[in-house]
Image (spheres, rainbow, N blue to C red):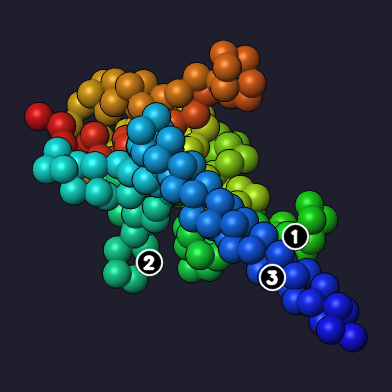
């Protein structure tokens, strides 16, 4: 009986020691190591890919879009507008999601039609010129980029609202356009937050 109790005790003590060792190694040492590597080699990415203004203040993340609207939710004409977002009230990082509505969903079809008419009127273009990403949300609802085609139809409206030549606005669009991933994956895209920040900080 005593031998059995001693055996059980040794087994329990061995299990406790293993648990303590792995707690220290996997719960403390490993996270600290990975955090240190991230901060040393990829500090910008590890800290959320922050976007800073000329004063050094963080104004957003390069990974998350933003809405540029007034207090009533109306789009501001002096800013480039992002694509629609189904994440919470729009670009909510805590509620990343798409609408999960299929292409034949009646509500989605109606919403797309309404958005197309609104965007065409807002930018003074034909509804046929409104690209698909202007009227549909991304799967995450957080996409910070828009197509070059969507940026193009907004240039004149932004230039007029700011009272600057359209060529200057177009140059900023080009400066904030990224090419396809790895040079061949996907299409060129325009980062809306960085573009609007560049517009605000232009000299």
- Residue at numbered disc 1: 101
User: Which of the two residues, 197 or 167, is positioned nearer the viewer here?
Assistant: 197
At x 64%, y 63%, the residue is 17
Give the x, y percent position of residue 148: 48, 28
Is residue 179 placed above or below 73 in the rendered structure? above
At x 49%, y 49%, the residue is 29
User: Which of the two residues, 30 or 164, is positioned nearer the viewer here?
Assistant: 30
Is residue 34 something one can see in this rendering? yes
- Residue at numbered disc 3: 13
Name the mark nearer the viewer: 1 or 3. Answer: 3
Give the CA distance from mark 2 to mark 1. Answer: 23 Å
Is residue 68 placed above or below 153 in the rendered structure? below
Is residue 151 placed above or below 58 in the rendered structure? above
Element at badge 1?
loop
Element at badge 3?
helix
Give the CA distance from mark 1 to mark 3. Answer: 55 Å
Q: Could you tell which of marks 2 and 3 lies nearer the N-terminus? A: 3
Q: From the image, which quarter does the C terminus lie in?
A: top left
Q: Residue furthest top?
A: 183
Is residue 80 something one can see in this rendering? no
Q: Residue furthest bottom?
A: 1
Left or right of residue 178: residue 129: right
- Residue at numbered disc 2: 73
Give the x, y percent position of residue 138: 61, 48
Give the CA distance from mark 2 to mark 3. Answer: 62 Å
Whether label 2 touches label 3, CB < 8 Å: no
User: Which of the two residues, 179 or 9, is positioned nearer the viewer here?
Assistant: 9
At x 36%, y 62%, the residue is 74
């Amino acid at each position: 009986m005593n031998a059995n109790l001693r055996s059980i005790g040794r087994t329990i003590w061995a299990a406790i020691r293993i648990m303590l060792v792995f707690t220290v190694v996997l719960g403390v040492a490993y996270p600290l190591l990975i955090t240190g590597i991230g901060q040393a080699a990829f500090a910008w990415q590890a800290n959320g890919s922050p976007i800073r203004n000329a004063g050094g203040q963080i104004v957003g993340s390069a990974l998350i879009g933003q809405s540029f609207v007034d207090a009533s939710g109306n789009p501001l004409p002096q800013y480039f507008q992002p694509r629609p977002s189904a994440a919470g009230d729009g670009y909510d990082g805590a509620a990343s999601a798409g609408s999960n509505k299929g292409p034949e969903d009646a509500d989605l079809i109606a919403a797309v039609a309404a958005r197309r008419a609104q965007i065409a009127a807002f930018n003074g273009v034909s509804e046929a010129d409104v690209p698909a990403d202007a009227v549909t949300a991304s799967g995450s609802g957080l996409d910070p980029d828009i197509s070059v085609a969507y940026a193009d139809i907004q240039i004149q409206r932004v230039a007029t609202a700011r009272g600057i030549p359209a060529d200057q606005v177009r140059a900023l669009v080009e400066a904030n356009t990224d090419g396809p991933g790895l040079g061949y994956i996907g299409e060129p895209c325009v980062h809306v937050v960085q573009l609007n920040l560049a517009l605000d900080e232009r000299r």
